[in-house]
Image (cartoon, helix red, strand yellow):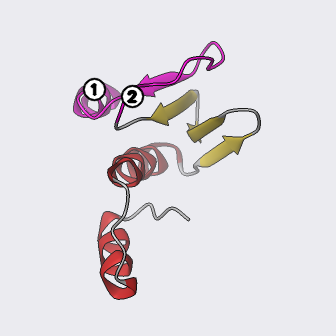
Amino acid sequence: MFFRDPFILHSTSEWVGREFNNSALLESVVQEHLFRKFGEVYFFKGSYEIGVVSGEYKIEVKSGRAHRGYPRGVTVLSEESIPRFLLELL
């Protein structure tokens, strides 16, 4: 389960006593930003996963090394590239 709002992610994590994966936080930040820009956010899961589908964007967020095999048009963001990507959307 993913939460778009980082506050809810942190609160729920503390409430249930389980830490969340850092990539979940990074993905929620990207999802929320794109939701505010386009008004809707989806994800795709088939033989591969695309964590954020919104507007013309298909994005997978990885906190570690990106896996190969994503279809053409999918942007794979690392922790370092997320701030630059979000600034380019403005």
Determine whether 59 is above or below 71 in the image.
below
The part of the chain drawn in magenta is 64-90
At a point 52% along the width and 43% down the height, the residue shown is 38
Residue 71, quarter of the rendered image: top right
Which percent across, then down, holds residue 37?
Answer: 44, 43
- CA neighbours of label 1 inside 10 A, class few (<14), some (14 to 19), many (20+): few
Q: Amino acid at mark 1?
A: Ser
Quadrant in the picture for the N terminus: bottom right
Quadrant in the picture for the C terminus: top left
Determine whether 31 is above or below 84 in the image.
below
Taking the magenta stretch, the answer to whether it contains residue 72 is yes
- CA neighbours of label 2 inside 10 A, class few (<14), some (14 to 19), many (20+): many
Q: Which mark is residue 81?
A: 1
At a point 35% along the width and 50% down the height, the residue shown is 29
Q: Which mark is residue 50?
A: none
Determine whether 20 is above or below 8 in the image.
above
Residue 63, quarter of the rendered image: top left
Q: Give the labeled residue for mark 2.
A: 77
At a point 64% along the width and 37% down the height, the residue shown is 49
Residue 16, quarter of the rendered image: bottom left
Q: Amino acid at mark 2?
A: Leu
Q: What distance separates the C-alpha of mark 2 from that of mark 1?
A: 6 Å
